[in-house]
Each structure stands twice: as C-alpha cells, then as structure tokens.
Amino acid sequence: MSSPSIMNVRNGDLDQNLTQQNRFEMIFNVLPNVTYTLNSVNLPGLMINNPATTTLFNTVWYEADSATFDQLTISFIIQENLANYFELHDWMRALSFPNSFEDRKDLERFTSTDSNGFLTVNNSYNIPLFRFHFHNIIPNTLSGLDLTSQSAEEMYASATFNFTIYHREIVPQL
C-alpha cells in the first residue's frame, strides 16, 4: 500500500496559507525610483468621534462626526547604496526647510500636491493579494542609521507617515 500523497489527502483548504512577515512592499508616487521592501508595517487603526447627548435617563450616542487614523509606520530594508533611505530623507527636507536656494532647486522634484503611497501585501507565493492606497501621505519621522562593522546583517530604518484616508483593493488573481 502506498503512503498518502498531498494530492489525495483531505487536509482542508490548501489555499489558506499563513501570511508571511517578509511579503510587504511600499511605493510612493513622489519617489518613483525606489521600492521599499518592508520588514514590518502596521495597518493604521481608526478612531471615530461619536457625539453624545445626555438625557434624563441615559446617554444617547450618535453616528460619528469625524474620524482619525493612526500614523502609518514602516520598517524597511535599506538598499546597499542607501538610495531608498536618502530618497525619503530628501522628501522630508523638501517638505521642511532646505538649506539654501540651490538646495531648494535640487529638492523641487519632491513638491507635489498629490502624494500617494501604495502598500502591497503579497501571499505566501509572493503574488500581490491586497493593495492599500494611502491618499495625501506625507512623511513625519525617519529613524537614524546605526552604522557598525561588527556584523554583516541587513540594515533597517523606520519611518512614520500621516495621511488623509486609505482604502483597500483586492488584487485580482490570474
């Protein structure tokens, strides 16, 4: 008698593999030259403000009159030439205060009235599963770099972003 094969054993739904931590990518329309391979990312939480009216007997809550998103935080692998780190660094400098008029001219490529970020979550076969569209995204913080010669491990940096709203897209599977 032959041993069971993965092809003939009823193990449940084989398409329900676990999400893997190394399957996230982030791109920004104002940074077309780099893709961020993420080590970690949080899908921002949402807080709504429910107005209340106090009555004689109890408090009555109403639908939200505003919403606030948590910041988007990413941790990304830094490219060997540091291109993805410095692209984000220069974008932040362009949004704040350049050092001189010449510096300002060098940073003009980052001035955009419509900046969007796209987070792609891949399945276990590295095929895009979801894409999250972050509208009016702007960087808020960028971590420093710890340069050390004690190990040959990948370098990581983290950044946080503010944005207006995001929506999700299910990427069609071919």
Image (cartoon, helix red, strand yellow):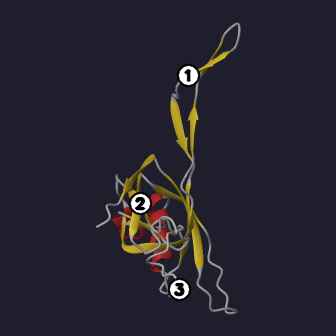
**Disc 1 crowd, CA 10 A, few/some/many (<14, 14-19, 20+):** few
Give left or right: position of 152 versus 98: right
Q: How far apart are marks 3 and 2 (CA)?
A: 38 Å
Q: Earlier in the sequence, mark 2 or mark 1?
A: 1
Residue type for callout 2: Phe
Please say if 1 is above or below 173: below
Q: Of helix, strand and loop, which one carries label 1?
A: loop
Q: Earlier in the sequence, mark 3 or mark 2?
A: 3
Q: Name the outermost residue toward the top.
A: 56
Q: Which of marks 3 and 1 is in front?
A: 3
What residue is pinned by disc 1? 62
What residue is pinned by disc 3? 3
**Disc 3 crowd, CA 10 A, few/some/many (<14, 14-19, 20+):** few
Q: Which of marks 3 and 2 is in front?
A: 3
Which residue corresponds to the image point at 56% horizontal and 71% vertical from the top-left? 21
Q: Of helix, strand and loop, which one carries label 3?
A: loop
Residue 48 x, y percent position in the rendering: 56, 35
Q: Name the outermost residue toward the front.
A: 1
Which residue corresponds to the image point at 54% horizontal and 55% vertical from the top-left? 43
Residue 166 x, y percent position in the rendering: 43, 49
What residue is pinned by disc 2? 130
Residue 46: quarter of image: top right
Total numbered circles: 3
Which residue corresponds to the image point at 47% horizontal and 56% vertical from the top-left? 138
Label ID, residue 113: none
Please say if 104 is above or below 156: above
